[in-house]
Amino acid sequence: MRKPELDVHQKKLVDEKRAEFEARQKQQDAFAKSHFPDGAQLCNKCSTAAVVMMDGCKTCLNCGESKCG
Ligand SMILES: [Zn+2]
């Protein structure tokens, strides 16, 4: 199974989103083993259950896809 390549900017964005999410949830190891938080929704872009709600936007912590509203 081929994973979509993330460019450098996108990787940085995802890292920042993860760090922010972990800080908020106080789950420093939330993603330590490629586990995503309970309640995370399936991303329709990368098909990973890594979509969480941040600032009113659904944000995928795997590929950086986000949808607001
Ligand atoms: Zn995704």
Image: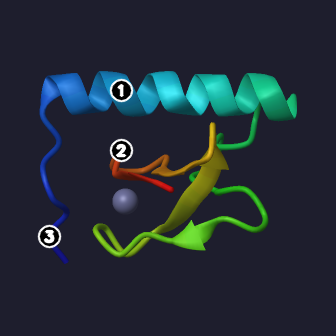
Residue in view at x 84 percent, y 35 percent = 25
Left or right: 41 as drawn, with respect to 39? left
Disc marking residue 13: 1
Separation of marks 3 and 1 at Cα, in angstroms: 21 Å
Check disc 1 and give the amino acid type.
Leu
Residue in view at x 48 percent, y 22 percent = 16
Residue 10 in picture, x, y percent from top left:
24, 32
Which quarter of the picture shows residue 41? bottom right
Quarter of the render that holds ligand 1: bottom left
Check disc 2 and give the amino acid type.
Gly
Residue contact at pointers 1 and 2, CB within 8 angstroms = yes
Q: Earlier in the sequence, mark 1 or mark 2?
A: 1
How many residues crowd around disc 1 within 10 Å: few (fewer than 14), some, or many (20 or more)?
some
From this view, report whether residue 8 is shown above or below residue 53.
above
Identify the element where label 2 is drawn: loop
Residue 21 in picture, x, y percent from top left:
68, 33
Identify the element where label 1 is drawn: helix
Residue in view at x 14 percent, y 70 percent = 2
From this view, report whether residue 65 is shown above or below residue 22.
below
Residue wearing tag 2: 64
Does the Cβ of the disc 3 residue fall within 8 Å of ligand 1? no
